[in-house]
Image (tube, coloured by chain):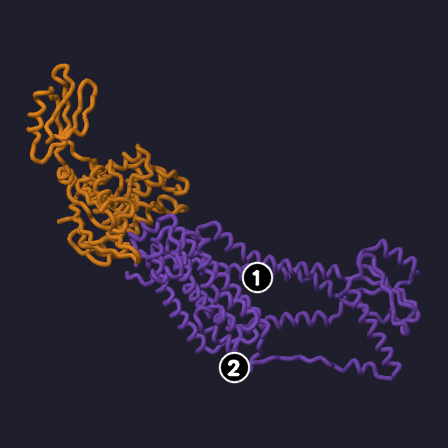
Amino acid sequence: MPMLTVKNIVKQYSNHRALDDVSLTIPKGSIFGLLGPNGAGKTSLIRIINQITAPDQGEVYFDGELLQPKHIARIGYLPEERGLYKKMKIGEQLLYLSQLKGLRKQEAIQKINYWFERLNMGDWWDKKVEDLSKGMQQKVQFVATVVHDPELIILDEPFSGFDPVNAQIIQDEILELNKKGATIIYSTHRMESVEELCDNIALINKSKKILDGSVKDIKRSYRNQTYIVTYQYLDVVDTLTLPPAFEIVENKAALDDYELTVHVDNEQSLNDLLLALIPQVNIKQVSEVIPSMHDIFIKQVTSAAIL
Amino acid sequence: MNKILLIIQREYLSRVKKKSFLLTTFLVPLFFIGMYVGIFFLTKKSFEDSHATVYIIDLEGNIGGKLKSNKNITYKVSAKSLTEQMGELKDGEDNNNLLIIPQDFYSSQRIELLSAGKPNITTQSEVKNQLKDIIRNDKYARLGLDIEAIQNIDDKITVTAKEISDTGDAKESHTEVAMGIAMALSVLVYLSLFLYGAQVMRGIIEEKTSRIVEVVISSVKPFQLMMGKIIGIGLVGITQFLLWIILSIALTSVATAFIFNGANVQTELLQSGIEQDALTKSEMGFDMMTALDSVNFPLLLSCFFIFFLGGYFLYSALFAAVGSAVDSETEASQFTMPITMPLLLTYILSFGVLVNDPNGTIATWLSFIPFTSPIAMLVRIPFGVPTWQIIVSVVLLISGFLVTTFIAARIYRVGILMYGKKASFKELIKWFRYKS
């Protein structure tokens, strides 16, 4: 049973449609990348999942049940726009927020202390938010998101504002939580970390879902028979000719070797390319070019813009 | 339900624990008591200062003995010569005076009053009045009228205003006291509605600009957050009023004891004066006490709390809607102006129309309309208001705040998530219409 199923969601604001018939399935225990440029509708969708706003059409199912207020306690949400009460002590603040999520006081104190220890925040209980650096505030915010052991954690741009060291700490914590069984929705418009973290993604652009599936499948489907061949010339000959079915994208010197990027047309295969190359060069290494999520993202979003 | 209690608790404690809360709670009554004591001492001081000694050089011969010392002036007929006395006056205290009565006093009706410092006006008029009486009595005597008979004609009139209650008993009414209490209530309610309403607004703006609101409303409904804040701050207000009442009673009793001691000094000063004067003084005090006794304090206090709370809920809901719609306090003023107009209007009217004609048409209507009744009804209550009117007013006020809360909640739930968007009234109406 999926952790979350979003069915045909429509959200209409007075002068624009924020979500247009969006459907998603988020498998239990996965890290799900919710991708899309700014203003695509990601935050609108997240707010609907958090029951901050309600959709105009469509339904959301949480763990098999229609989404209800009682599910709030099982969801953790880190909004993109971070915020804490500036004048409130960190400890009291986390206690308040976790009690709002339904934890009992004693339980909450125990869990806050666990996270304080884990993230080296030992003596932060009596500090005020306004006395902390931005990175430290982010840590507090992260604890507020996960302190009640949610089964579904929604992270909207979780790494913005973190220095590389702390970003790594938080990333490790996210992976650890996922290993323990939490399902994670990771919303971002920065693709670098997506391949590293996500099992599945959905790409939203201009209120519509334009792509979804497992990262592996998507990347596989975006292969287009382009290969990189590392080679050396047989003798002193340094020219290379290929039949028109093989389009040379790039041919450049790399250290002692040469690197050839070739696009093979649909009639031919890698074997045909190798047959054409073998008489001319010493092949040292061949690999298929698999597009990065970044490339796919750019390609999808810009092609949508052209249409 | 549990969550709204948590929110109320946070809103309440975070404010009550603030230093500024303690400071205003203790300083405001101290300030008023301080003013009370200060005025008493200043009055006493000026009383002492104004007491003058007047030396008389009576060239006419018969006048000096007729002038009578009282609490303001001590007369002393001088046996010294004019120059001698003038020299003494120059070196003497500021409030020493020299009265020179010429030989032809009755015909010229002129005197000279010399003073070391600036001649005191009270002394001047006191001397003048006594001398006028002397001249008049002299004229009466010449005309052959019986002076004593004339003096015994008492042309004073005492009005005892009584109001007839429903049961037909007449009880003394004290309009001045009622007026005083009415105006004090008007100021108090007006200021506190503004003060606490603005606190609600500021709290919401803070949550919105710091973005904490998104975290909180992923746990609770926007309505719970809004009501939690309004109730929490309302409780802060009630706490403050209760503390003020307790502190004022405590401090007043301390101050009264203190002033009572001080009053002995006054009695000493009075001993040289006319007995009757002291008598009227105590009578006035007695009057004041009975007047205050005539005020129904339990009714007044319970009405104060009911109407303060009703008005607070009504206006703070509107303040909450405004807070949710704007990004900063400066932006808020375009909305707070129109919503607080009825309050301001009633406040201004309360000093004129309402206290002068507390049962008139305007006052009655204003005390029914929920937007104006918190002030208007409280102003009327010290003068006595039929019970049915109070009940109608309270019912209307409660329905009023239910309506404003409903409207505010619908604007609030949309507004708190609208960052960086300039809201207009048109926009607010649109937000109100969004379905939930």
Give the letter of the orange chain.
Answer: A
Which of the chains bears the disc numbered 2?
B
Q: Which residue is mark 1?
A: B253
Mark 2 belongs to which amino acid? Answer: Ser
A215, B140: nearer the viewer: A215
Q: CA distance from mark 1 to mark 2?
A: 32 Å
Position of B252 compared to B409: left or right? right
Residue A188, x across and y down, in percent: 26, 42
Residue B352 position (above or below residue A271)? below
Name the residue at 81% across, 68% down.
B127
Chain bearing mark 1: B
Which residue is more in the foreground, A203 or B143?
A203
Per the rendering, the colour in which chain B appears is purple
Label of residue A142 in the image: none
Q: Earlier in the sequence, mark 1 or mark 2?
A: 2
Q: Is residue B148 left or right of residue A159?
A: right
Residue at screen point 44% across, 60% down: B335
Determine whether the residue tagged by mark 1 lies in a helix, strand or loop.
helix
Q: At 33% from the left edge and 46% from the top edge, which residue is drawn?
A: A81
Q: Position of residue B312 (x, y in %)?
A: 43, 63
Residue B4 shows in this picture: no
Q: Position of residue B341 (x, y in %)?
A: 48, 65
Badge 2 local density, few (<14 within 10 Å), some, or many (20+)? Answer: few
Q: Which residue is mark 2?
A: B165
Marks 1 and 2: CB-CB under 8 Å?
A: no
Q: Are marks 1 and 2 on the same chain?
A: yes
Please tell me which residue is depicted at 89% across the width and 59% down the height of the picture. Answer: B85
Where is residue A82 drawn, in percent x and y? 34, 45
Q: Of the residues shown, which amino acid type is indicated by label 1? A: Ser
